[in-house]
Image (spheres, helix red, strand yellow):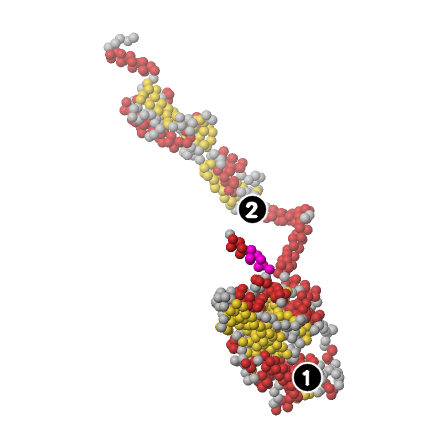
């Protein structure tokens, strides 16, 4: 885990360099679109009081100065499938955003939904013998968390301390400065497949950029789509993307569970294409214009011109009623939601005090989805749109951009992760130097 | 039926790939680099301009070809009749001074007023001994008017360098060859006399009762005055308040005819003890009379 620690620390250092330069790019690599925002960081912001451990990574105000989206290519299920295609798509988005920002960007923070994220809750405890808790103690307790065997070929994407307990007082967000005998910590760790990260790294390197951070898009969408009290009291954010649906559960302003279902809006589109025998582009257009999941009597009478370019008059003049379209879409959406339901059940979402569910992402714009989701997921369902951030163009304020906006918040106000703390000194080679200094101080 | 218009109004082959090539992407990024941008936008045009200017002006002939019309234009404006000085009009100067001023004026005379530095010319004219001040004015019709205020001769000064005329301030005006050339002016002599002309004039005014006998004043030791009368008589005045001493001598003369007697010098240098130096024969005569008074026979 030490190599990963170093890699993540290197990314944090890169983020520091980007903050110094003042410009950073946000790249949301999705299955249907690739969104790129260019942020201008305006120096340190006032510290948010409710932050867990306080800003260890440095925080900043920001303003969006460039935004661009492009149709995604070479990405399937939120993972890069065809490298040159994906690289070209990333380049298109980046160039357009740079052109709008009129600034050259060298550092990028990326998020993706694929890679099969898995969540682990870790517990660690150390003895303190009555001393004040310092940063080194926190690093010690984080290092003491017993890492599960998450398998080879997987890497840690997030490792965030969620909760601290000092002696018998649990639920501390920042134990520094307090005294106790026994410090325990809960940490949430998320792993993804190494190959996904490597592919992404390679693509970004081919675009002459430095990676300054990585995040899961479920986490990013949760940051921007959940309002503060939902994050505090417990809520799940369902980010319904094109190729994958991300699930993140938040409580006490921390993500405690993240997962993704490899189903999304593109499956709905392909169902329509297959069912109506139309090309995927036409199916996408029909879905966005006429799609829905709740059929009414009116929908039987509303006919949709499907059209085609085959030359056969009968085929080119086909029509279909909206009820038929809904009949194609609804089972697939139900399947996605049921899959989400299964994941939430597995995570124990039922035990949370507040069971708010927020639907966001591009596929959440299907009319009537909130009613359907309420039947499957539970009563407290709402549609979420991303937080409003300064300078974001109107076109990029829809639910499809909650991942990108959340990632900008992540770039500007990152939560503390394990690698923001110094490695404990007994794992550190510099300890001999410390010992030498101590010897000098004792003897002279 | 296949729609005919679908392909008809598509002008060219549709570009399939909106992605920039790697080279285009890199060039775009390079162009967005502030340093490169500034270099291309400012540095390149400036460099090109500098190169062009250097290429044009490197050749001496071309430089001359560019400079010649400019010079000709400037010269043609300078030589316009409105700016020419044709005549020097001198007022308030004697013939000698006028000749000297003309010699210093612009020469040859139809000259451009751009070439004449009036301030320098005025200073040059005022440097003449006989000129107290000069006013120069460019009038229309090509006239340079010079109004000169001459110094007034007040006294003659005989020094080791000869006889010269001074004004009231002691400034030298001109050299005089003979005393007889200006019989109306009093004479002073001695080193440092020129610095005290005002004092000398006041003394001469005081000595008006003796005017017919007065020969002049002599500055002694750059400190005090001697009044020289005809026949070599002197009145030696103190350094302080010489006029009062002179008035006492004049009063004595008017009462007792002091100066008509055989007196060589009246010494007033110590005002508390005026002394009379008698001529040699007079002293012998006085001794003889005293001996007679004492009842002694002569020698």
Query: Horizontal placement of A320 versus B143: left or right?
Result: right
The residue where tag 1 is placed is: A272
* A368 w.r.t. B63: above or below: below
Q: Which corner quadrant holds the N terminus of chain B?
A: bottom right
Residue under the point 60% across and 71% down? A147
Q: Secondary structure at mark 1?
A: helix
**Which residue is labeled 2 in the image?**
B83
Question: Which residue corresponds to the image point at 51% horizontal and 65% vertical from the top-left?
Answer: A134
Q: Residues within 10 Å of mark 2 (few under 14, many from 20)?
A: some
For the point 49% across and 65% down, which residue is it? A131
| Relative image position of residue A163 (x, y in whole percent) | 53, 72
Tags 1 and 2 touching, CB below 8 Å: no
Query: Can you see residue A51?
Result: no
Please identify the quarter of the rendering in which residue B297 is found.
top left
Viewport quadrant of the C terminus of chain B: top left
Q: Is residue B78 above or below residue A306?
A: above
Which of the pair A35/A48 is nearer the observer?
A48
The image quadrant of residue A209 is bottom right
> Magenta residues: mostly which secondary structure?
helix
Which label belongs to residue A381?
A: none
Q: Nearer the viewer, mark 1 or mark 2?
A: 1
Q: Residue at x 24, y 13 (%)?
A: B293
Residue B63, compared with residue A380, is above or below; it is above
């Amino acid at each position: 885990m030490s190599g990963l620690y170093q890699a993540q620390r290197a990314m944090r250092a890169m983020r520091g360099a980007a903050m110094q330069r003042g410009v950073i790019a946000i790249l949301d690599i999705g299955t249907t679109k690739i969104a790129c925002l260019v942020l201008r960081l305006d120096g340190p912001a006032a510290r948010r009081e409710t932050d867990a451990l306080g800003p260890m990574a440095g925080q900043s105000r920001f303003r969006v100065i460039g935004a661009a989206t492009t149709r995604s290519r070479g990405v399937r299920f939120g993972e890069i499938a065809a490298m040159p295609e994906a690289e070209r798509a990333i380049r298109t988005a980046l160039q357009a955003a740079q052109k709008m920002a009129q600034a050259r960007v060298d550092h990028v923070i990326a998020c993706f939904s694929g890679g099969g994220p898995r969540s682990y809750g870790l517990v660690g405890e150390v003895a303190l013998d009555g001393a004040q808790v310092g940063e080194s103690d926190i690093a010690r307790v984080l290092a003491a968390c017993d890492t599960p065997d998450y398998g080879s070929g997987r890497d840690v994407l997030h490792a965030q301390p969620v909760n601290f307990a000092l002696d018998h007082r649990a639920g501390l967000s920042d134990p520094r400065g307090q005294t106790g005998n026994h410090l325990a910590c809960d940490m949430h760790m998320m792993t993804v497949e190494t190959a996904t990260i490597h592919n992404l790294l390679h693509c970004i390197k081919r675009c002459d950029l430095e990676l300054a951070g990585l995040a899961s898009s479920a986490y990013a969408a949760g940051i921007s789509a959940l309002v503060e009290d939902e994050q505090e009291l417990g809520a799940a954010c369902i980010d319904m993307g094109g190729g994958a649906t991300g699930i993140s559960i938040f409580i006490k302003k921390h993500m405690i569970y993240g997962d993704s279902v490899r189903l999304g809006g593109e499956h709905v589109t392909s169902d329509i294409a297959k069912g109506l025998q139309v090309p995927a582009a036409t199916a996408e257009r029909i879905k966005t214009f006429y799609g829905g999941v709740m059929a009414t009597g009116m929908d039987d009478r509303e006919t949709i011109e499907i059209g085609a370019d085959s030359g056969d008059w009968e085929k080119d003049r086909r029509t279909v009623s909206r009820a038929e379209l809904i009949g194609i879409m609804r089972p697939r959406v139900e399947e996605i939601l049921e899959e989400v339901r299964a994941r939430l059940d597995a995570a124990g979402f039922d035990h949370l005090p507040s069971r708010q569910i927020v639907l966001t992402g591009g596929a959440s714009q299907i009319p009537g989805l909130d009613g359907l989701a309420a039947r499957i997921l539970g009563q407290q369902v709402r549609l979420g749109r991303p937080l409003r951030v300064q300078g974001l163009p109107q076109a990029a304020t829809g639910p499809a951009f909650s991942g990108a906006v959340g990632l900008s918040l992540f770039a500007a106000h990152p939560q503390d992760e394990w690698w923001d703390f110094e490695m404990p000194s007994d794992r550190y080679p510099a300890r001999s130097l410390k010992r030498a200094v101590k010897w000098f101080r004792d003897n002279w | 039926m296949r729609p005919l218009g679908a392909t008809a109004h598509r002008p060219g082959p549709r570009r399939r790939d909106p992605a920039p090539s790697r080279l285009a992407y890199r060039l775009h990024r390079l162009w967005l680099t502030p340093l490169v941008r500034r270099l291309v936008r400012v540095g390149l045009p400036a460099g090109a301009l500098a190169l062009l200017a250097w290429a044009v002006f490197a050749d001496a002939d071309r430089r001359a070809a560019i400079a010649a019309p400019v010079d000709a234009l400037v010269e043609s404006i300078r030589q316009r009749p409105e700016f020419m000085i044709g005549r020097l009009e001198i007022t308030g100067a004697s013939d000698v001074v006028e000749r000297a001023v003309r010699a210093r004026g612009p020469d040859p005379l139809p000259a451009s007023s751009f070439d004449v530095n009036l301030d320098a010319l005025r200073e040059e004219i005022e440097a003449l001994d006989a000129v107290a001040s000069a006013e120069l004015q460019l009038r229309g019709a090509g006239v340079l008017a010079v109004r000169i205020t001459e110094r007034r001769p007040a006294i003659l000064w005989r020094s080791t360098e000869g006889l010269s005329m001074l004004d009231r301030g002691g400034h030298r005006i001109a050299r005089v060859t003979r005393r007889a050339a200006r019989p109306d002016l009093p004479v002073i002599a001695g080193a440092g006399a020129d610095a005290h002309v005002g004092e000398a004039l006041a003394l001469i005014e005081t000595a008006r009762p003796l005017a017919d006998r007065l020969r002049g004043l002599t500055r002694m030791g750059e400190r005090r005055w001697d009044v020289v009368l005809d026949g070599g008589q002197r009145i030696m005045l103190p350094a302080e308040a010489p006029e009062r001493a002179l008035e006492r001598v004049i009063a004595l003369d008017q009462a007792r005819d002091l100066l008509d007697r055989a007196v060589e010098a009246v010494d007033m240098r110590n005002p508390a003890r005026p002394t009379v130096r008698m001529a040699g024969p007079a002293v012998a005569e006085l001794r003889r009379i005293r001996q007679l008074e004492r009842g002694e026979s002569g020698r």
